[in-house]
Image: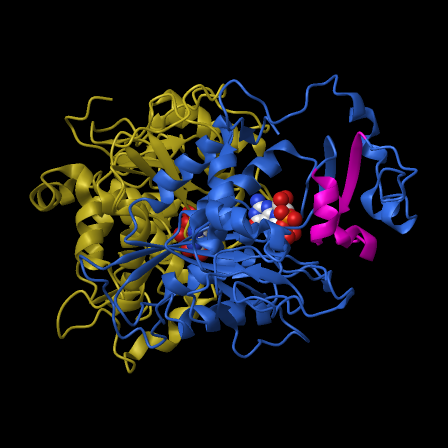
Chain colours: A yellow, B blue
Amino acid sequence: MADLFCEPFPDKSWLLPRDFPLIDQFDSLNQNSPNCHGNMLKNNVINSSAMSKPSYIYLHLVHDYGDHDKLFFCDGDQSFLENVPWLIMKTDNYYVPSLFLIPSFETELRNLFPEKATVFHHLGRYLFHPSNHVWGLITRYYRTYLAKADERIGIQIRIFDSRRGPFKHVMDQILSCTLKEKLLPAVDMQDSVVNPSENAKLKAVLVTSLLSGYSEDLRNMYWEHPTMTGEVVGVYQPSHEEFQQTEKQMHNRKAWAEMYLLSLTDVLVTSAWSTFGYVAQGLGGLRPWILYKTENDTVPDPPCHRAMSMEPCFHAPPFYDCKAKKGIDTGILVPHVRHCEDISWGLKVVDDHDDL
Amino acid sequence: MADLFCEPFPDKSWLLPRDFPLIDQFDSLNQNSPNCHGNMLKNNVINSSAMSKPSYIYLHLVHDYGDHDKLFFCDGDQSFLENVPWLIMKTDNYYVPSLFLIPSFETELRNLFPEKATVFHHLGRYLFHPSNHVWGLITRYYRTYLAKADERIGIQIRIFDSRRGPFKHVMDQILSCTLKEKLLPAVDMQDSVVNPSENAKLKAVLVTSLLSGYSEDLRNMYWEHPTMTGEVVGVYQPSHEEFQQTEKQMHNRKAWAEMYLLSLTDVLVTSAWSTFGYVAQGLGGLRPWILYKTENDTVPDPPCHRAMSMEPCFHAPPFYDCKAKKGIDTGILVPHVRHCEDISWGLKVVDDHDDL
Ligand SMILES: Nc1nc2c(ncn2[C@@H]2O[C@H](COP(=O)(O)OP(=O)(O)O)[C@@H](O)[C@H]2O)c(=O)[nH]1
Ligand SMILES: Nc1nc2c(ncn2[C@@H]2O[C@H](COP(=O)(O)OP(=O)(O)O)[C@@H](O)[C@H]2O)c(=O)[nH]1
């Protein structure tokens, strides 16, 4: 943590003190732990008069969570949890959209976030401050490669495929999206324009990807051919780590720096399903064009879609009507919580006034 | 040719007309051809009264040429050749330095090149005009990646080694040379400076190499660490073709574009022995720092040396005293023809007033 983030509040720490009593148990907490909220519900321990008030409760909100764990998002359970001294939560999901479906949270959320679709944006900018080292990576890269451009375009390429890549259909999709949406200029394969004009507009494309192939193709295209618009286009990729290496310090620093750098672009293209992209769009306050997930190695039509809001998608939301105690489509209950563009069953917060 | 160069003179061509009589024989001309100058001398055909004046003579000035071929550089032979209607020459060497040792050429050369060490510079700029396609590659790359920098540094890396590379000792040599000679700023491995200042000087390093490894290491170094001077350093490499592919059109276009781009830098570092570097320094009018050839995988000490002049080195000069008819060190006869920095037996033209 200290390697990646600064403490957000002076003289305070968001890390628990080392002697915090429960710390040793954290690793072993899981869905079947006696103090797991879902597990307690399943075993009817809660609300039984025999129950002594627990000093802590473990909330299992990981992607593999079960129906009982999901009751966390019900008003009744919240009023119980409210009085538990310590809540310990594990999650790898951005569950904010479902908080907007808890009636008792409504007023507080409206006050905190009058513009609903800015939750991640504000929290992210308030809490996530890059460490000095990462800030060095960000500012040096920006000054060196991006600052002097007239426009900055970010393209985040994250392909969830067990094969290695790069894939031609992904490259085709990127080109198809950026050209169709006029994010990047088309090139003139006839080379009829030879010279970029003295005051040609300079566009800088920041590509992030585990592989170098996509940005190399793009860079070559704009080197080998002039653009139809007379603009010149530089293509930059800070790293190509080949595969995810979560245990390496420098790898994680670079990943964080790259998310932040993407957030500094003027126009953002992201990959469906990717947290990496969500963080960039959220911090940057950007509504990205999302590259749809490809199927059968073909370019989706359309290849991409403008996001409704800058908010991340909650990948594993509950579909449960707490009052009626039955399944329900939680993506159509209120105008500001919708199904995501990139994951049909996901939920995301959008502004009421967004025209979709 | 047409793919790489424009005709230098309007309405003229430097290509022979297709129906030029001898064209079919060009490929078969070699050291043993009856009309080969060296061969004729060996067989005592020239100057024999029986000889009918030849309508053409073939000059074999390729790197593997023999002692008789080398007599081309003698005054006596020149006065004979002067009267031959057609001279056909094959060469892969820059033999200009030895022309400066022919007494009868002296006046003409002095008039043509009052500054002696500018022969390649003037001829190159007068005759070698990039084709439209190559000019597009040059201008687009320059505008996109180099134009906005405060200073441009070219590093041409050409390693003659049968093994693949990149090599650590070569990387070490490049760093050692550029830091020692203060061509590039040192980095602060302690990361004590975090932010480049708003008006930090921007240096752009243009690397050319068949491999991408060297420039990646350099780019990473200046990304991961701040410089001691507060400058920011961007590293760019137009292509990495992996190996020489002379048959491919685009490969040759890019090679030519890269030589030209190197010539547009403010400070140039080249590799010993390489024509690629000579062309860049000559066109650019630059006295490069030459990276010495490494031996036994160790960094030479010193790692590089500033060239005496911008002229290319003649790799296979004759060592013959035409008057005395005996071997001689042709590198110490006149002040303006010296042994090269990168090849001890080579010859290069330097200016009389160069302080060495
Ligand atoms: N440096 C870098 N790392 C990446 C990139 N894409 C993925 N990674 C690595 O993969 C991790 C992404 O994991 P996660 O944040 O869960 O995002 P997701 O998998 O895209 O949803 C990052 O933390 C990096 O370690 C990239 O473009 N650049
Ligand atoms: N694009 C590119 N090609 C290179 C580079 N280095 C060598 N080559 C290739 O190798 C050839 C160099 O041959 P030559 O001109 O005889 O130069 P020398 O071998 O360095 O003396 C070029 O024409 C290219 O085909 C490089 O840095 N970039």
- Position in image of residue B184 (x %, y %): 37, 66
> Does the segment drawn in magenta span residue B67?
yes
Viewer-nearest residue: B82 or B19? B82
Task: Give the quadrant of residue A201.
Answer: top left
Viewer can see residue B210: no
Residue farthest along the bottom direction in this orientation: A19
A239 in relation to A232, above or below: below
Residue farthest along the front direction in this orientation: B49
Viewer-nearest residue: B87 or A48? B87
Which residue is located at x 46 percent, y 61 percent?
B351
Task: Give the quadrant of residue A49.
Answer: bottom left
Name the side, left or right, on which A247 lies relative to A105.
right
Viewer can see residue B44: yes
Image quarter hosting the N terminus of chain B: top right
Which residue is located at x 46 percent, y 19 percent?
A301
- Position in image of residue B292 (x %, y %): 58, 69
Q: What is the span of residues highlighted in magenta in the rendered image?
A: B55-82
- Position in image of residue A60 (x %, y %): 37, 56
How many tags in the picture?
Answer: 0
Name the side, left or right, on which B28 lies relative to B276.
right
Which residue is located at x 52 percent, y 77 percent?
B302
- Position in image of residue A88 (x %, y %): 30, 64
> Does the segment drawn in magenta span residue B39?
no
Name the side, left or right, on which A7 lies relative to A164.
left
